[in-house]
Each structure stands twice: as C-alpha cells, then as structure tokens.
C-alpha cells in the first residue's frame, strides 16, 4: 500500500457504532460494526464485506484492513500466476 495511507481512511462513520468502507467512487463495499462483549467489558469489531462476515477484530484499524484486503482481492485474477508466464518452451 502507499506510504502514509491506511484502509481506515476509507471508513465513513455513521450511524453510531458503524463505519462504512467507501471506494473512491463513493460506493460502499464493506461495513464495520462495534460490539461490546463479556458483559460490556471488551470491545470487538465485526468486519463485513458485501454482506459476508469476514471475522471479528480487536481494533477498528484491523477490521478495516480485513475488509480492504477482500476488496483488493476481488479486483484481481483468482489463483496463482501462470507458471511459464506465456513463454514457449525452447525446442531442442
């Protein structure tokens, strides 16, 4: 990622206790919701990408990063790189 930039910068707060992850075009691609657990003693953040729960985090920053990584993965090809990178074998 670019130096000095963090996925939390894509988070827009609102309504209370909810952050919406917004892309440069203004479209929402994920949400983070704060939850109190253990009788209100601890805080957890639920990370959701396109309606699917990715997991729970102990910090807002980590939850935003989980969602942003899923967003980036959705923009690339699936699977690994082609082994030969399109080169033809050399005839012997």
Image (tube, rainbow, N blue to C red):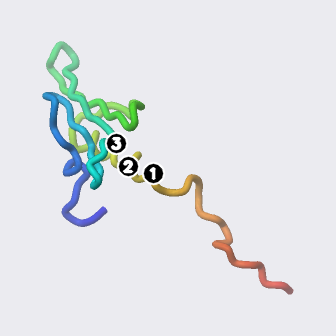
Q: Quadrant of the C terminus?
A: bottom right
- Residue farthest top in this picture: 39
Separation of residues labelled 3 and 2 (CA atoms): 11 Å
Q: Is 80 on the left-hand or right-hand side of 71?
A: right
- Picture quadrant where residue 17 is located: top left
Q: Quadrant of residue 60?
A: top left
Left or right: where 16 falls relative to 1:
left
| CB under 8 Å between discs 1 and 3 | no
Q: What is the residue that sits farthest to the right in this orientation? A: 92
Q: In x, y percent, where is residue 16?
A: 13, 28
Residue 49 lies left or right of residue 88; in this view the side is left
Which residue does the numbered mark 1 point to in the structure image? 73
Between the residue at mark 1 and the residue at mark 3, the CA separation in whole angstroms equals 12 Å
Q: Earlier in the sequence, mark 1 or mark 3?
A: 3
Q: Residue 15's x, y, as percent? A: 16, 29
**Mark 1: few/some/many CA within 10 Å (<14, 14-19, 20+):** few
Asked which secondary structure carries label 1, the reply is helix
């Amino acid at each position: 990622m670019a130096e000095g930039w963090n996925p939390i910068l894509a988070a827009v707060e609102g309504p209370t206790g909810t952050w919406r992850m917004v892309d440069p075009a203004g479209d929402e691609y994920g949400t983070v919701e704060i939850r109190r657990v253990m009788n209100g003693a601890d805080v957890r953040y639920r990370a959701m990408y396109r309606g699917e729960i990715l997991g729970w985090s102990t910090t807002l920053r980590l939850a935003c990063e989980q969602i942003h990584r899923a967003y980036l993965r959705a923009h690339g090809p699936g699977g690994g790189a082609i082994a030969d990178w399109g080169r033809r074998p050399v005839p012997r």
